[in-house]
Image (cartoon, rainbow, N blue to C red):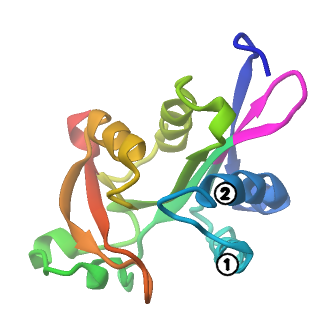
């Protein structure tokens, strides 16, 4: 890696993301093995069982960043619009108003993951991934969970216009995560 190495960011639909699973998995496994996440092989396996299901959604969006010269994956992000039956809002420790939690499959884009491998951080890649992922999105807002001890990620999301709306345990046994919302109408 050189400081000037060009990075390409590619937008992918669900089928193309499924084909590129190993690249997504490589970035995820490396980034989320670090504190505060400390994910192990079993955690990564579980995440990619979900990934395979998620990529089958017609509205799934993924983005991959690669070092242009060698094609090495350096970052990724993905998500999809939340359906009316989403359980996301039920995970909050304090309820939010019904008007906020109403979903119709178009209103809210759930940003499931965004990660950049350590050697490539602090170069604006996460912001590029985020921008490409949301480009042309017709949703009104974006929802995500972030571990509060992931200080760099939390700071980036807040700088990009997200605001904290609550806390949640995204899965059984998970640490408490901050739930952040970005209003796309104000961008």
Q: How crowded is mark 2: few (under 14 residues within 10 Å), some or many (20 or more)?
A: many
Q: Name the residue under label 2.
A: 28
Question: Where is residue 45 drawn, in percent x and y?
Answer: 73, 77
Q: Name the one closer to the observer, 27 or 30.
A: 30
Q: Residue furthest left?
A: 97
Q: How crowded is mark 1: few (under 14 residues within 10 Å), some or many (20 or more)?
A: few
Residue 133: which quarter of the image? top right
Residue shown at 20% from the left, 81% from the top: 93
Q: Residue furthest top?
A: 4
What residue did someone put label 1 on?
Answer: 53
Residue 69 in which image quadrant = top right
Task: Judge whether residue 73 is colored magenta.
Answer: yes
- Residue at the spot 58% in from the left edge and 56% down from the top edge: 34
- Is 92 left or right of 21, judged from the image as shown? left
Lower sequence index among marks 2 and 1: 2
Could you say whether the residue bearing mark 1 is in a helix, strand or loop? helix
**SS category of the residue bearing label 2:** helix
Magenta stretch: includes residue 87: no
């Amino acid at each position: 890696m050189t400081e000037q190495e060009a990075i390409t960011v590619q937008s992918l639909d669900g089928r193309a993301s499924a084909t590129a699973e190993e690249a997504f998995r490589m970035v995820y496994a490396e980034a989320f093995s670090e504190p505060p996440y400390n994910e192990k092989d079993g955690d990564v396996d579980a995440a990619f069982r979900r990934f395979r299901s998620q990529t089958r959604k017609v509205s799934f969006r993924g983005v991959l960043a690669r070092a242009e010269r060698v094609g090495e994956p350096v970052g990724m992000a993905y998500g999809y619009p939340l359906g009316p039956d989403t359980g996301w809002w039920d995970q909050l420790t304090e309820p939010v108003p019904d008007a906020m939690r109403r979903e119709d499959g178009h209103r809210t884009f759930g940003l499931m993951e965004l990660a950049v491998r350590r050697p490539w951080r602090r170069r604006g890649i996460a912001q590029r991934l985020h921008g490409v992922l949301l480009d042309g999105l017709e949703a009104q807002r974006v929802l995500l969970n972030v571990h509060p001890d992931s200080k760099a990620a939390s700071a980036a999301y807040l700088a990009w216009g997200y605001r904290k709306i609550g806390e949640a345990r995204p899965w059984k046994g998970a640490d408490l995560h901050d739930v952040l919302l970005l209003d796309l109408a104000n961008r």
